[in-house]
Image (cartoon, rainbow, N blue to C red):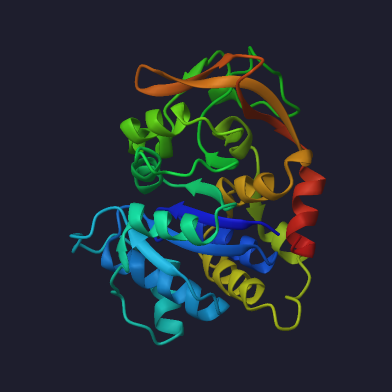
Amino acid sequence: MPDVIVETDLGHDPDDLFALCYLAAARVAIRAITIVPGDPDQLAVARLFARVTGIDISIGASHLTGRKPSSGGIHHALLKHFGLPRDAEADGPGEQVVATAMGRFPDAELFIIGPCTSTARYLARPDARVPRRVTMQGGFLGYHLHSPTIRLPEFEGKEWMPTFNLNGDRKGAAVLMAAPVPDRRLVGKNVCHTILYDAAVHASMPSPPRGNAAAELFRLAMNLYLANHASKKWHDPTAAVCHLHPEIGTWVRGRVTKIGSGWGTVLDETGDHILADIDRNALWEKFRTWK
């Protein structure tokens, strides 16, 4: 499994935590995590994840002065479950945490499931080592460019849409998209919004493998989530599987482009890989087997 550095707004939408649990359960070598923006309770959730899964890593923040809590829901419930405080500190600025990890693990890949603030600051440095692979959850591919297996009414006729992670740091997104990354992949809402983790999917999940603390944390967190929600749109976990197993996706070559208040895609045979569709059976099998 690859060395991976993660940028995430963990502690907001719970699917960041589910994505991290999947990566750790699949035995990916997570080498560092940087949090956007890095509020104390977000950092507490990151510390919880590292502690429960036994991962010894540095945790950075894009803003070190955050003092207002911004998390809640299952995240605070998990902190209470494990008897952990709701606030924690970062090990340093996110871009420095990324730089240190890249120095120790020069073949590390980037996995971005939040605004790309610290990763972009790192890539803007003259001494930055450009990773071979980057996957980011974000972007949008209109149906006029590829008609997927499942189409949603809200995307019919749309050539661009607002996407949270890219809009969260537009300048950072421009830096990331301009970096000469050989294999850059965007996993957007045109596919992610069609994938739901619900009670039926949860019931089909086997018991966590013995000794796999990340899979156990995933189950506990999902039990808490489904106690109050019918389903979860599967954004970041889908991107996580696509990072490890791009072969289950249908990809279109193009460039993610800022349009108005959102983002669209311009086709380009030499461009990035933009997710157009996915083998859903294969996707769920990766979660059932933690591969």
Residue 1 horizontal/vertical position (percent): 71, 59
Residue 258 horizontal/vertical position (percent): 41, 20
Residue 184 horizontal/vertical position (percent): 59, 34
Tell me the quarter of the picture where residue 19 sits: bottom right
Extreme residue in the bottom direction? 83
Extreme residue in the front direction? 127
On screen, 118 above or below 209? above
Residue 31 horizontal/vertical position (percent): 52, 63
Picture quarter with the C terminus:
bottom right
Tell me the quarter of the picture where residue 80 sits: bottom left
Q: Is residue 178 visible?
A: yes
Q: Is residue 281 left or right of residue 197?
A: right
Query: Who is closer to the viewer here, 171 or 204?
Result: 171
On screen, 53 above or below 123? below
Q: Is residue 14 visible?
A: no
Tell me the quarter of the picture where residue 192 sits: top right
Query: Who is closer to the viewer here, 93 or 42?
Result: 93
Query: Who is closer to the viewer here, 233 or 171?
Result: 171
Q: Residue at x 74, y 63 (%)?
A: 290
Q: Is residue 59 left or right of residue 269?
A: left
How many numbered discs, if any? 0
Q: Residue at x 54, y 49 (%)?
A: 111
On screen, 177 above or below 217? above
Q: Residue at x 76, y 56 (%)?
A: 286
